[in-house]
Image: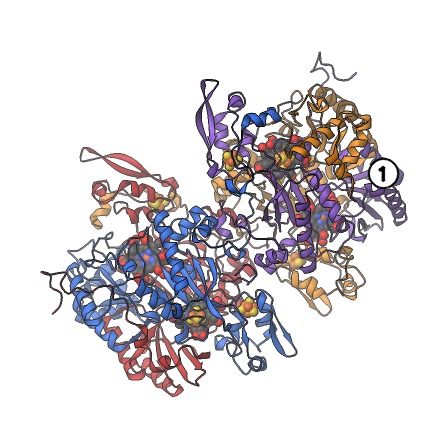
Chain colours: A orange, B purple, C red, D blue
């Protein structure tokens, strides 16, 4: 039944990890265009080079993003993938689904597309992989009308925000990442769908410094939960850990015999700030020295919890390496409250300040982190109206090249060389 | 009804955004959101979260190839319907999580999963290898220097036991990106598999006029290697560009801006391995991955060199690192010279930075270890 | 005989180099070179080295202002003649070392030194403050933004007790340079006192033609702030330069290349304080000093603001650091936010790097301490 | 008697630290030009600005360095310092002197100069502070003929090399810094006296990683002693330290009560590589993990000594901040033998290779460290014929921007776009 021989891809059907080739082949039985996916991919395996052409601007009316155009360079041989545009469907926060919802979406995709998907794309969208130009509008119609759902982002706009699972199933979340993500996504539908930025822009929301959505590595604005009071300690539970009655790190290391749990070695000595110690059988923390790295909490989840006065740190400017090398986000707001109670006011205000500025000064295809590098962190802070504090930096500058402003220097910059020379002959 | 191409604007709905997440919560999640107290990984792939209400939720994590069919998703829905009241979720690393609200429901679910053969491997938790975050590769993208799904399949086949167990010193996050655009967090992964080009772009003078804005193409090059040029096409002089190949470091940004500058090539393209990145703030600050193997060939369909390189690093790490120590923390503790030795990776000058912040990576101390590198 | 200007080349000798060091060795040094086994600081300023031959040498270290007269050196020679067989040495930090070959000879030497009043302070060893390495300042140089010897005198008066004792957590190396050329190791000192300009250069159009090579002046500016310009002097148009003051960071390199671009100014010039540098490889690698106080005025003759700033940092360090911990190691352990707080130094955006490698100093983690800086 | 009133400078005569003002005044009694030094300095204290003019090229015949020209901008008021050139006299290695030598030099300076000096300049020279142009040749004549001594360096040449005290009085020196410094200084007299480099070039020699001459911070070639076998341990002495019979750190901390010596806390825990431990009352070191930081040896000088197979690490490229920010030297040769036995052959060969290259490619006023930065470390290593090893870097690159060379890539760089397009339609 195979439309193309795939001797190379067939070799990816062995081995314990589930095989996308097997899956494609099964799907091809009902969606014959999948044979052409297999065929063109097999050809790439033979040629060791992609067979997709460069880009192609397609979309649905009124949206500047959400679809990535794609055409095969061998349309004759593989007519089923001649057009092979992907559709990015905005995922729900935390990526929970009902099977009803998923089945409905799958039915739509069976009707309008290739039958193949990515659950999920790296940004967070549901990726529907491959369809023809003429199917885009009908699919979009059904998606909006039948399912009440929408496309995600692509292009120079706000990309689909994403979040870690947060409070819905994690004990450490310091704000409601789902609600923050959803609320901001809804607030900025226009920014998601209609490109007006110098380049792409991403939000990601993690509930604590473990950063399970990798916000600090790959979002222009990274909102990462934290607290400002003391780590909550259950001393009885500490004792249970010491006694070996609770598994360290929630059992994460139970596959190997690491010996008896040793609180000194495994917690206290690994605390990066050395702010913990045992005293009278109790675990003590000098919380003002704690940098909330999460290590001790991670290792002793039944004994330690983040403090109760919770909020988030906001960092700005992460991106992939092109062009200047990769950037992590830089800490800009050490602590803000992030809550629906005030409609995420502080966060929204900050975001819009960043945007206003970046839209004005950002160059074409310049991520906000690059703009920050170009103008310098002091300038960025000043345009944001954020007072510079040592928390913004790892360490003070080691070069002495300070840009003094004229108004800071007594007497200003203007001087009379003749008057100077009268006192200091050349 | 449906879309009517004759009246494209009629009845159009837009800006709906994603569905509200709450409607997809399994009941036990809905009831306990914000009330979770602690968790425990009861066996590889099975997490138990305990609520202050006394409720428990068991999450069974299942590896997925991410590139999945409609049929596959339907099958996953079948499983969720059977065991999980019709709910499920996906993790930030493309695993599937099936949640049940009591311990008793775990084993039947595991049995169902097992009944599908190797299709739904349970694991990816704790101190093991979880799913490889990856990108499109030859399945969809126009700029890849390698495939994505195939490499991931080959690597995960080899690392399968690390997915289904928790025997490593710490979690190990592996990511793959098929070109330097690095869609994903390859730049901050314990082990990163990165598609790279090694030949400068060709200039398609016959097409460049129509498809490129030359000033943008010229400006796209971070090293100023793209210069304006005049060339003759069919006897007519046209404006084009040329590339100073000495200055090119194969980033592909010019191709992103200008389709008439392709750089892919069967021999030129392949994989670089970077290691020691991390994202979490646990103990140490987030770290970038560092390039330790500059090139491995695109040896389809199973990339044996890449698979072995990843495995070798993982085994060396597993044998040597301390409990809780991530790959990058380990490498920094033992020193990079020792890392290369322990992993049996030949050191090349390609690992020495010569880009913009390069000086910060030079060794400006006489602290070093005598390794086999010193003759 | 002597030099004969009529026949300048006659009898000329050159390229002799320095005298051979060995002829200046005190006998005990000559006899034991390469045989020393261990040392002990028997009291502040007094080192004892023990040889495998059983010999001992006692070195008495004495602080000197470095800017010293012929008479001063003669007096030092008198002391060395009296006690040290006519030998002495200077350390790499401009202290004088008088060496004697037995314990009995120490006290008489100390007595002689004491007889000169405060002229020959004994100290500068171990966990204390030793001499301040410094430069020319207003005594000799053309580019200084502050004086050298005067500031050092004022600071050392205040820190005198730290010179004559060993009560600090570790050695503290203070250095002063009077301009950004940083003659010395100010860039790698526990505490650095650095003369800085804050006004852009003036252009002396009347003189520029004769004294400057304009292309060199233009090329000298690391930020491209110096541009060619045409100006009128006495009704004649001449080629000169102009400075884009927005881009100037007052490094003075243009003045070094072109005397017609002076930038010194009574109000503009002053002192910046940098801390946390080190040179030794002990425990941690060498570190650069970091700018923590961007400006203090040239308040002659005793620079009280500078003296107090240095003292404050030193006291905070003395109170808080662990044994063996250098200033920079302490700051990194407690975190720079805590450093500013403990030293009671107001943080300003001037401490935030915005030069070439700036990004590497940004805080790309959510690890931080709550200090008074967070409102 | 004072020729000028010096109310400001007079305030520097109080306080416990020896006063250069007092010294100047005393010298002025016999050398009246010192009054003008005081006078012009007082004026600077009043004006808060230097009164020395920019440079001035003066020197002795046949030398391109050794003298720094200097003129006062108020010669009328201060005729004694109208010319105020400094003379740099090459210091002996380690700066040992006989009083006879010093007295003779002082006599010369009394005769030919201002009577003021710096013992020593920051590079290491004896600085004779201030004389007139017409005195230069006579001084030089006397210096060479009467004393057999010579000038040091200034200008774009090899600057006067300097060294730590080394083996002559330090138990840790891993090679003879004095002999190395002296030998190389004599070898390169021509390079010191006749500028032929793009910019200044400095050597400094430290006997061990404590680096008491700050070589790694301020010399283009930094030679720093090290060893490649095991730290020598005297276990009996270790016991004495533990018992508190020997003062830790050679008594360097004896001014304060730091409590009883604790080898675990003060040595083992501070070892940066964690390669030490106590076993059966003995101190053990896993020497292959040791990075020879010196800390343990510094703390236990009577018990520990550097290994016996000694040599030096050679680092390249330190400099002050202008223009790119300060640089430390970068480790290039981890270990070489540095000994007179082979006339410092390995070191000399390396130095000359650096010079040959730098003189060819270095731009005007570009220090070798800047040239290294400009061409990149891999290129520098390759032109030096040094095999790249991980010891050259702190960490591998984190960007993926590798410059592949054409010959490294199968099939080379040349390709035929038509042939490509035949397989990959645009
Ligand atoms: C589909 C997806 C990869 C995947 O398989 O998951 C993807 C695919 C593409 N990315 Fe991406 N990026 C995807 C997530 C990312 C991420 C990860 C993230 O968002 O968390 C990154 C790194 C983070 C960041 O933004 O820096 C990322 C960094 C890039 C870049 C580099 C951007 C930069 O500023 O350096 C490009 C280049 C560009 O924009 O031209 C890029 C460009 C592209 C393009 C559009 C190719 C191009 O040159 O125009 C790819 C289209 C592939 C295709 O054929 O469908 N993609 N891209 C991901 C989006 C799916 C989704 O919506 O969920
Ligand atoms: C389900 C998920 C969040 C989600 O919204 O989907 C999640 C869930 C949990 N993470 Fe995570 N993390 C998830 C992605 C991440 C990521 C992001 C990534 O890998 O791309 C990170 C940052 C990775 C990095 O640092 O490079 C991440 C770094 C952590 C850490 C920090 C560990 C460390 O030592 O660095 C912890 C704490 C721990 O494991 O001790 C953690 C802990 C946890 C806990 C224990 C939180 C809790 O109490 O429920 C969860 C179970 C951990 C487990 O699987 O062993 N989670 N976690 C993600 C599962 C991905 C997967 O399918 O494998
Ligand atoms: C005499 C001198 C060498 C010379 O050729 O003149 C010297 C001599 C000694 N140094 Fe030094 N050092 C001398 C300048 C330096 C310098 C250079 C500088 O300060 O400009 C350094 C690097 C400074 C830095 O790291 O910023 C230096 C870093 C050390 C260290 C490393 C300490 C650390 O913890 O970082 C030691 C080891 C120790 O003290 O435990 C050391 C140890 C020693 C010993 C104990 C070596 C020995 O066994 O004889 C000597 C006596 C130390 C003392 O004074 O307490 N010496 N020492 C220099 C005295 C300068 C002075 O007058 O004060
Ligand atoms: C005399 C001395 C300072 C002192 O009081 O000790 C000195 C004085 C001058 N230095 Fe220096 N440097 C002196 C040691 C240093 C050092 C320290 C060292 O050599 O260990 C450095 C830092 C290390 C380095 O080389 O990077 C140093 C880095 C500079 C620089 C910056 C060079 C650079 O590459 O960044 C300049 C600027 C220049 O060369 O134009 C400079 C320029 C100067 C000039 C010639 C001024 C100028 O702009 O042309 C000064 C002449 C002052 C005068 O009126 O006599 N001086 N200079 C030191 C030489 C005495 C001696 O020979 O022993
Ligand atoms: S980032 Fe924190 S809150 Fe979010 S899932 Fe991970 S551990 Fe939980
Ligand atoms: S969270 Fe991190 S810094 Fe804070 S006490 Fe725990 S281990 Fe230490
Ligand atoms: S990493 Fe590169 S090749 Fe892969 S999907 Fe992203 S843009 Fe395409
Ligand atoms: S691949 Fe990158 S470096 Fe090479 S020419 Fe294109 S943009 Fe420039
Ligand atoms: S630091 Fe500057 S002002 Fe001071 S001596 Fe050196 S060059 Fe002159
Ligand atoms: S002082 Fe420095 S930055 Fe300013 S113009 Fe001169 S060279 Fe340029
Ligand atoms: S550098 Fe080492 S060998 Fe030289 S004096 Fe200092 S401690 Fe001794
Ligand atoms: S020299 Fe340094 S690294 Fe080596 S054992 Fe001693 S303390 Fe450890």
Residue at 35% over, 56% down: D201
Front residue of B178 and D87: B178
Q: Can residue C179 be spotted in the picture?
A: no
Q: Where does label 1 land, which residue?
A: B80
- The x, y position of residue D147, in whole percent, is 21, 71
Front residue of D413 and C71: D413
Q: Is residue A63 above or below residue B244?
A: above
Residue at 37% over, 40% down: C224
- The x, y position of residue B187, in whole percent, is 61, 44
Q: Can residue A179 be spotted in the picture?
A: yes
Determine the residue located farthest toward the bottom in the rendered image. C104
- The x, y position of residue B215, in whole percent, is 47, 27
Q: Residues within 10 Å of mark 1 (few under 14, many from 20)?
A: many
- The x, y position of residue D231, in whole percent, is 54, 72
Determine the residue located farthest toward the left in the rendered image. C6
Asked whether, in this view, residue D232 is left or right of residue D349, the answer is right
Question: On the image, which quarter does residue C72 sit in?
Answer: bottom left
Residue at 28% over, 82% down: C81
The total of numbered circles placed on residues is 1
Asked whether, in this view, residue D162 is left or right of residue B43, the answer is left
């Amino acid at each position: 039944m195979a439309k193309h021989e795939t001797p190379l891809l067939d070799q990816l059907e062995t081995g314990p990890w589930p095989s996308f080739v097997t899956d494609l082949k099964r799907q091809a039985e009902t969606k014959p265009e999948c044979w052409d996916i297999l065929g063109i991919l097999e050809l790439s395996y033979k040629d060791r080079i992609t067979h997709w052409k460069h880009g192609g601007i397609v979309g649905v009316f009124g949206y500047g993003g959400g679809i990535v155009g794609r055409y095969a360079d061998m349309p004759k041989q593989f007519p089923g993938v001649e057009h092979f545009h992907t559709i990015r469907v905005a995922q729900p926060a935390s990526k929970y689904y009902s099977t009803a919802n998923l089945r409905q979406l799958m039915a739509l995709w069976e009707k309008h597309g290739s039958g193949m998907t990515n659950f999920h794309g790296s940004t967070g969208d549901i990726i529907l992989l491959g369809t023809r130009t003429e199917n885009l509008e009908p699919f979009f119609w059904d998606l909006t009308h039948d399912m009440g759902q929408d496309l995600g982002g692509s292009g120079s706009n706000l990309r689909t925000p994403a979040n870690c699972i947060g409070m819905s199933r994690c004990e450490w979340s310091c704000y409601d990442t789902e609600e923050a993500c959803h609320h901001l996504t809804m607030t900025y539908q226009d920014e998601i769908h209609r490109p007006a930025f110098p380049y792409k822009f991403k939000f990601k929301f993690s509930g604590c410094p473990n950063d399970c959505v990798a916000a600090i590595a790959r979002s222009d604005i990274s909102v990462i939960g934290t607290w400002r009071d003391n780590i909550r300690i259950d001393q009885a539970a500490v004792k249970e850990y010491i006694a070996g009655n609770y598994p360290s790190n929630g059992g994460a290391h139970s596959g190997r015999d690491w010996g008896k749990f040793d609180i000194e070695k495994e917690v206290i000595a690994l605390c990066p700030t050395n702010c913990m110690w045992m005293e009278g059988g109790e675990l003590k923390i000098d919380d003002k020295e704690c940098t909330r790295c999460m290590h001790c909490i991670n290792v002793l989840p039944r004994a330690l919890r983040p403090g109760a006065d919770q909020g988030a740190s906001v960092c700005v400017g992460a991106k992939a390496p092109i062009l200047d090398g990769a950037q992590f986000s830089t800490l800009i707001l050490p602590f803000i409250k992030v809550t629906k109670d005030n409609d995420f006011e502080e966060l929204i205000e900050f975001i819009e300040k960043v945007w206003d500025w970046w839209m004005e000064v950002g160059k074409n295809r310049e991520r906000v982190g690059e703009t920050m590098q170009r103008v310098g962190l002091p300038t960025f802070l000043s345009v944001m109206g954020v007072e510079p504090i040592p928390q913004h930096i790892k360490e003070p500058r080691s070069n002495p090249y300070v840009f003094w402003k004229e108004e800071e220097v007594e007497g200003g910059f203007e001087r009379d060389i003749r008057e100077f020379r009268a006192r200091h002959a050349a | 009804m449906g879309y009517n191409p004759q009246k494209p604007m009629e009845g159009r709905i837009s800006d709906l955004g994603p569905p509200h997440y709450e409607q997809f919560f399994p009941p036990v999640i809905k009831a306990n959101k914000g009330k979770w107290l602690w968790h425990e990984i009861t066996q590889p792939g099975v997490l138990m979260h305990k609520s202050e209400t006394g409720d428990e939720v068991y999450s069974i994590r299942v590896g997925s190839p991410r590139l999945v069919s409609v049929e596959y998703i339907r099958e996953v829905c079948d499983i969720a319907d059977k065991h999980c009241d019709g709910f499920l979720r996906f993790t930030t690393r493309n695993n599937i999580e099936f949640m049940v609200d009591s311990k008793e429901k775990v084993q039947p679910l595991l049995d169902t999963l097992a009944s599908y053969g190797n299709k739904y491997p349970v694991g990816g938790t704790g101190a093991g290898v979880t799913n490889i975050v990856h990108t499109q590769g030859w399945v969809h993208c126009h700029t890849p220097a390698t495939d994505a799904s195939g490499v991931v399949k080959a690597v995960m086949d080899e690392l399968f036991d690390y997915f289904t167990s928790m025997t490593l010193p710490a979690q190990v996050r592996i990511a793959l990106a098929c070109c330097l655009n690095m869609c994903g967090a390859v730049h901050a992964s314990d082990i990163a598999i990165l598609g790279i080009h090694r030949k400068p772009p060709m200039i398609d003078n016959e097409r460049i006029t129509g498809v490129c804005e030359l000033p943008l193409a010229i400006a796209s090059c971070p090293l100023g290697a793209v210069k304006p040029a005049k060339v003759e096409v069919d006897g007519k002089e046209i404006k084009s560009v040329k590339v100073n190949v000495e200055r090119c470091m194969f980033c592909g940004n010019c191709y992103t801006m200008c389709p008439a500058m392709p750089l892919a090539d069967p021999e030129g393209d392949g994989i670089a391995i970077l290691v020691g990145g991390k994202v979490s703030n646990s103990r140490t600050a987030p770290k970038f991955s560092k390039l330790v193997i500059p090139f491995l060939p695109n040896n389809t369909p199973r990339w044996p060199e890449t698979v072995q390189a990843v495995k070798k690093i993982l085994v060396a790490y597993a044998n040597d690192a301390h409990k809780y120590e991530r790959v990058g923390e380990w490498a920094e503790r033992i020193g990079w010279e020792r890392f290369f030795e322990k992993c049996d990776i030949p050191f090349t000058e390609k690992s020495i930075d010569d880009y913009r912040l390069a000086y910060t990576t030079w060794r400006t101390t006489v602290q070093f270890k005598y390794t086999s590198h010193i003759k």
